Amino acid sequence: MIVRKIILIILTLVFLFGCINDQFYTNESDSRPRPDNDSNQSNNNVIGSWVVTFYEDLENGIIIKKSDVDSWGGLDVELKFKGDSTFCGFNTTNEIAGHYILKDSTINIDVYGGTKVGQPEWGNMFSDIVHSFSSFSRSKSQLKLYYNNFKNCVVLYPVRIEIYCHWTY
């Protein structure tokens, strides 16, 4: 009797959560357009919790996803931009934190702290360009950070659960 109740509860939860049309980052292979979940957010800020989903070469149309490089089984780069111009998060195996300067659609990461210890290629890709960000755009639940004279960008999507940082800048 108890086993039946447990199975019924589990099946109900699976059904409920499986039917939610998720507008947040779930996995990189989901290429469906995401609805605008940040209609109350200004498109002129980066505030929120984000996950890097891919890197894009805008000149050649090349997209590099996490599955294309070593990510140690899918470790993410997650950032939480705060309203006080600081950010924190996780770069695959390491915690990160820093400070950013935002003016109109320009962004400058002037302080970036964290290590690259034990970091797979997916994490190194972010660490290697973080100081090169020059501009951003935000629309329809997507944040793009541009670098290399607008020839490249990092594309981020919001995460469902707010990122909890152990240390901040």
Image: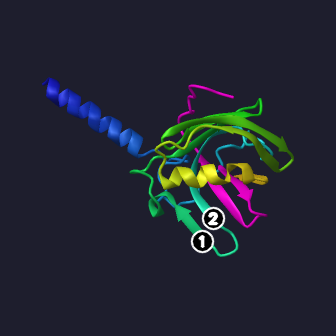
Rendered location of residue 147, percent (x, y): 74, 58
Rendered location of residue 97, percent (x, y): 65, 34
Q: Which residue is mark 2?
A: 56
Residue at x-position 45% and y-position 53%? 71
Residue at x-position 73% and y-position 67%? 151
Q: In the rendering, which numbered label is found on residue 62? A: 1
Q: Nearer the viewer, residue 122 or 15?
A: 122
Real-space CA distance between mark 2 and mark 1, rounded to the nearest whole angstrom: 6 Å
Q: Compared to 136, does 98 lie above or below?
A: above
Rendered location of residue 43, percent (x, y): 77, 47
Q: Compared to 17, does 140 lie above or below?
A: below
Q: Which region shows up in magenta? A: 140-169
Which residue is farthest left? 1
Q: Is residue 35 visible?
A: no
In the rendered structure, the answer to whether residue 73 lies left or right of residue 169 reads left
Q: Compared to 111, does 36 lie above or below?
A: below
Q: Is disc 2 in contact with disc 1, using a CB cutoff of under 8 Å?
A: yes
In the rendered structure, the answer to whether residue 61 lies left or right of residue 13 reads right
> Identity of the amino acid at label 1?
Ile
Q: Is residue 117 visible?
A: yes
Residue at x-position 47% and y-position 61%? 69
Quadrant in which the N terminus appears: top left
Crowd tier of the residue under label 1, counting other residues whose Cα lies within 10 Å: few below 14, some 14–19, many 20 or above: few
Q: Is residue 150 magenta?
A: yes
> Identity of the amino acid at label 2?
Glu
Residue at x-position 53% and y-position 48%? 25
